[in-house]
Image: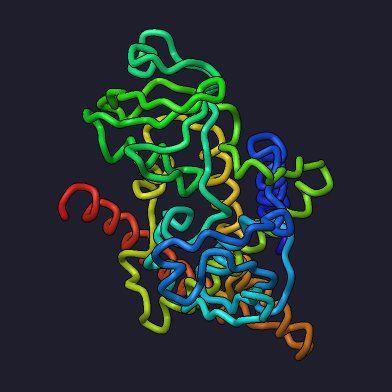
């Protein structure tokens, strides 16, 4: 009865692990952030200060700095920080994720102001025409510090068809270059892997073992966050019609441009969500069958066929009603609203 759920979990762990190993490649250890965090607007609002060293989440130490930007924190947590040699407890409210949205890297906190190293300038594109060269180091955009690994992508997407002033270091010399942003929100540059963290911070390469360990942690974190999300739905803290996605909504999340890292992360996430949904104790789902079997094993009495038939009908009505609502909600949001 639980074989399907188990296989979904195994697939989710495998996808998360291999994505870390193949696409991420390395991670920044929390211990390596010797200068402390850089607190952005929302971080400062809850009491964090630039220079704080976060040493624990809910009383537990952690290895990856990026865990500070996960649902483990954004859904509410207590951060233990060292400030001027003293321990300080910072409470992250359980609705904090609503404020950060997908922009926690630029609104919450970071390891420091980042830089992008240009790996390749695409011939004929706007960056090439403006004079950007391979190995240029981009330090600022429109005199703004780079505050997160997705900063450039988001910034250019918001300024389609406009121009941006790039502050660049070339062979040790600073210079400014104005570049046109295309209608697609790009300038025609490929970056050298991950963005570069502050110069004296060194990232740790993922090994097969560490990728599997962190991938497993990330996969189960999605289960925890989904359980928290369900709790918020039933408590009325979230609107059901805004929180569920059907086929159309899922297709929109995948996007219209093929991106392998994005594809695999979402696929791993969906696999874990499917495992969570199927193990819920609802008739007609695996979890419902498991519940009835557990009751039978304890009572040593078998449910009648008539009772089981009725429960299956109830379960199917619930599931079909949910499908109608979700797909209808998708159509409403996509084409009518």
Residue 79 found in image quarter: bottom right
Q: Nearer the viewer, residue 185 or 4?
A: 185
Q: Quick check: 160 above or below 318?
A: above
Q: Which residue corresponds to the image point at 24% horizontal and 48% vertical from the top-left?
A: 334
Residue 329 placement (x, y as % from top left): 28, 59
Q: Nearer the viewer, residue 290 or 143?
A: 143
Residue 182 placement (x, y as % from top left): 28, 24
Residue 245 placement (x, y as % from top left): 38, 56
Q: Quick check: 54 above or below 12?
A: below
Q: Quick check: 18 above or below 10?
A: above
The residue sitting at the left extreme is 336
The residue sitting at the front extreme is 173
Determine whether, in the image, residue 179 is placed left or right of residue 17: left
Q: Which residue corresponds to the image point at 29% horizontal and 27% vertical from the top-left?
A: 181
Q: Which residue corresponds to the image point at 37% horizontal and 33% vertical from the top-left?
A: 256
Q: Nearer the viewer, residue 321 or 131?
A: 131
Q: Quadrant of the N terminus?
A: bottom right
Q: Quadrant of the C terminus?
A: bottom left
Determine whether, in the image, residue 130 is placed left or right of residue 68: left
Residue 215 placement (x, y as % from top left): 71, 51
Determine if residue 4 is in view: no
Q: Nearer the viewer, residue 320 or 204?
A: 204
Residue 274 found in image quarter: bottom right
Determine whether, in the image, residue 174 is placed left or right of residue 161: right
């Amino acid at each position: 009865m639980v074989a399907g759920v188990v296989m979904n979990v195994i697939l989710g762990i495998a996808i998360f692990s291999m994505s870390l190993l193949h696409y991420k490649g390395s991670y920044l250890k929390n211990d390596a952030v010797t200068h402390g965090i850089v607190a952005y607007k929302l971080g400062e609002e809850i009491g964090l200060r630039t220079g704080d060293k976060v040493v624990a989440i809910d009383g537990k130490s952690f290895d990856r700095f990026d865990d500070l930007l996960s649902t483990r924190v954004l859904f509410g947590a207590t951060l233990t920080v060292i400030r001027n040699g003293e321990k300080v407890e910072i409470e992250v409210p359980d609705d904090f994720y609503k404020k950060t949205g997908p922009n926690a890297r630029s609104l919450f906190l970071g390891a420091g102001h980042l830089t992008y190293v240009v790996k390749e300038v695409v011939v004929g594109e706007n960056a090439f025409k403006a004079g950007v060269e391979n190995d240029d180091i981009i330090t600022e955009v429109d005199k703004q510090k780079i505050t997160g690994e997705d900063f450039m992508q988001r910034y250019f997407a918001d300024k389609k068809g406009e121009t941006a002033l790039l502050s660049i270091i070339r062979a040790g010399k600073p210079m400014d270059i104005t570049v046109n942003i295309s209608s697609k929100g790009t300038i025609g540059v490929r970056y050298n892997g991950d963005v570069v963290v502050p110069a004296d911070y060194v990232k740790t390469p993922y090994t097969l073992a560490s990728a599997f360990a962190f991938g497993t942690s990330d996969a189960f974190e999605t289960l925890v966050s989904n359980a928290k999300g369900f709790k918020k739905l039933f408590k009325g803290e979230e609107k059901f019609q805004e929180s569920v996605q059907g086929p159309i909504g899922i297709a929109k999340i995948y996007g219209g441009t093929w991106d392998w890292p994005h594809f695999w992360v979402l696929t791993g996430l969906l696999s874990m969500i499917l495992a969570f949904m199927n193990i819920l104790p609802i008739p007609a789902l695996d979890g419902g069958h498991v519940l009835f079997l557990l009751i039978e094993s304890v009572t040593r009495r078998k449910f009648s066929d008539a009772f089981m038939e009725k429960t299956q009908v109830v379960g199917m009505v619930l599931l079909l009603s949910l499908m109608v609502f979700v797909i209808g909600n998708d159509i409403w949001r996509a084409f009518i609203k």
